[in-house]
Image: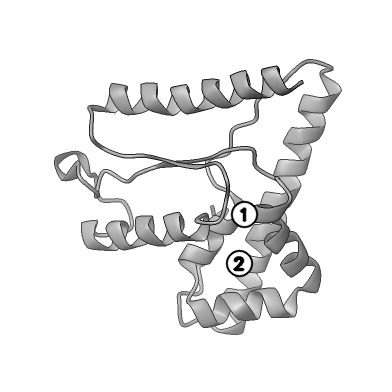
Amino acid sequence: MNGGCLYPGLNGGDKLIAFETSLIELQLQMEQTFFSVAQSSGRPSVILYDRGLLDVAAYVPRDLWSDVLYHNQWLRDGMLGVLQHGRYDLILHMESAACGAEKHYQVRKESIEEARDLDKKIKGCWRGHPYHRIVDNSTDFQGKLDRALEFVVRLLDSSNTES
């Protein structure tokens, strides 16, 4: 997500820190808005996001990620709380086609090697989450979607039995 802005690149220094901080602020606002809308419906709701807050760390060099957190105390507190305080009930990682389904990988911005590396980094960002589930490429795409849905249904079923 960049809204047409010019990405400063991995060597962008302070510009990259400002860029990523702004994207995180936007993500937080979108998440809060979706949560408020769901809550206002008065009905049980499921909110699905394409990206989670910690995904950003996979796109930023490690030393700059530390700088993003260091320069934004409120952000650091919020980001570190993502794993401990249940901001996301389930992290569903849909593995890139670059990892095991190479014939279906369509080059976007990343080469197949870069996509594999990014996939690994994103998995690592969520490693400490208690409900981090990986949907690999061991089946066809419909099978992959079915397994993803199964994880969501299982979570919803367990939530209903706990209530």
Residue shown at the point (20%, 45%) measured from the top left = 100
| Res 148 → quadrant | top left
Residue sitting nearer the eye, 112 or 22: 112
- Dots 2, 1 in contact, CB < 8 A: no
Do we see residue 150 in this rendering?
Answer: yes
**Residue located at (81% from left, 18% from top):** 41
Alpha carbon of mark 2 to alpha carbon of mark 1: how far? Answer: 11 Å
Q: Can you tell which quarter of the image residue 13 is in?
A: bottom right
Whether residue 5 sits left or right of residue 9 in the image: it is: right
Name the residue located 22 percent from the left edge and 44 percent from the top edge.
105
Residue identifier under label 1? 53
Residue identifier under label 2: 20
- Residue 89: percent from the left, percent from the top? 64, 38
**Residue type of the residue flagged with mark 1:** Leu
The way the protein has been coloured in the rendering is one colour
Pick the residue in front: 61 or 108. Answer: 61
Residue 145: % across, % down: 37, 25
Q: Please, which residue is most extreme toward the left here?
A: 103
From this view, report whether residue 103 is shown above or below residue 154. below
Disc 1 on helix, strand or loop?
helix
